[in-house]
Amino acid sequence: MTSRGALRELIRLREFRAMWIGSTVSTAGDQLAAVALSLLVFERTHSAAWTALTWSMTLFPPLISGPLLGWVADRFPRRTVMVTTAWLQAVLMAVMAIPGMPLWAMIVLLVVVLMISTPYLAAQEASLPHVLPANRYSDGVALFGTSVDIAQMAGLAAAGFLVAHTDPGVALGINAATFVLLAILVQVSVKHRPAADPLGRKKKEDEPRGALTLMVTEPRLRTLLGVRLLAGLAMVPEGLAVPLAASLNAVWAVGLILAIEPAANVLGVALLFRFIRDPAKRERLIGPLAILSLAPLIMFAFNPNLTWTITLLVIAGMGGAYHTPARAAWMRLLPDEYRGRAYGIGRAALRSSQGGGMALAGVVSHSIGSVTATIAGAGGIGLLLAAQATIAWRRARGRAETKAVAI
């Protein structure tokens, strides 16, 4: 994560502190709600298929809302967007918690809650460069990212206990309360700033007109997005966690395999920011760490036992720490008036790569009859793409630095 001095400095920033606490608590609440709703569906339908479908519904709405609603964070004041969407989510979650609410209505409300989370997250992400000093921006992004990972793990762990000992509606009510807390914290702590692009027309003469055009034509932005989309290959072991554990005669280890990636990622980010203090040096490590996140998967070609499987996944998960400096650099390079729209598009692309990668891995694994060969193949393809991205990132940064010196 960050050094103690940097952490203390970040927490002293009132705007950042409010956004960080609210987002972390709300993330934990989201996990409670997801587990509670899945349990409700199973209790009422006794169908594993409907339960799995309900859980999968948490993945798909951002694919639509990202490109369609990200612009809200640029067109309106970002504090207003965050407060309004948080209150809307609180109300919808409270309605879901009403006893006897029909399942179809709950699922529709869940989809709406997830859809309107995009403008909130886009506004939050676009606000961080204004809230944080330039020399602490990367530290702030790292703290946000690791806190979300920890909150997700803690929320899922707490959900199992809470839902088992209380009514699932209680978990939904708790999640509604977290959105209320989030709305209040942002309202009283975050400064009002004018909309970045109120008419959707602001641009400089040397910039492309649209966020997507900018992301595709600017070499550094294009490369950073591409290297982050490699997560679709890096997460193949998670998508195959159940058959992988079964092939190791250790079905009990499914939860462990699923927990390794976020836990190892937190460790990797902590080490990266502990020993590499200069943001520019961290950016230079984006490519090598992306390679490290995929190279260990090739070793699954040798059918490793459980101990080696865990070791390889831990190493790969630590390599995934590159997403934090890549995320920070990407948002820093974007013009302010495009940040909301670009975030929405980028989030949808990342979710698509993750979901698509895991789905394709399932098809390939079934076709060839080998889980480990599928993982090894994903690692090999990913390694080649990561190496190419590393070279492209180095060239793009070099050209930008040369241009800056010339100016």
Image (cartoon, rainbow, N blue to C red):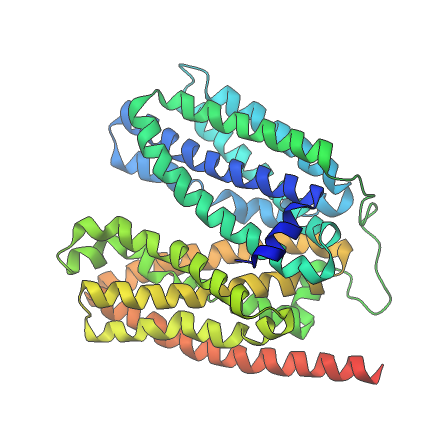
The answer to whether any part of residue 29 appears in the image is: yes
User: Which residue appears at 37% of the width and 67% of the height?
Assistant: 316
Looking at this view, name the residue that lies furthest to the left.
249
| Closer to us: 212 or 390 | 390
Q: Is residue 185 left or right of residue 54?
A: right
- Residue 110, placed above or below residue 222: above
The answer to whether any part of residue 345 appears in the image is: no
| Closer to us: 12 or 359 | 12
| Closer to us: 217 or 389 | 389
Q: Position of residue 5 (x, y in %)?
A: 61, 56
The answer to which image quadrant residue 233 occupies is bottom left
* Number of callouts: 0
Q: Is residue 272 left or right of residue 358?
A: right
- Residue 47, placed above or below residue 213: above
Q: Position of residue 2 (x, y in %)?
A: 56, 58
Q: Is residue 218 left or right of residue 164?
A: right
User: Which residue appears at 41% of the width and 21% of the height?
Assistant: 169
User: Which residue appears at 65% of the width and 50% of the height?
Assistant: 10
| Closer to us: 91 or 100 | 91
Q: Position of residue 266 (x, y in %)?
A: 45, 57
Q: Position of residue 109 (x, y in %)?
A: 50, 28
Quarter placement of the C terminus: bottom right
User: Which residue appears at 28% of the width and 55% of the height?
Assistant: 257
- Residue 68, placed above or below residue 25: below
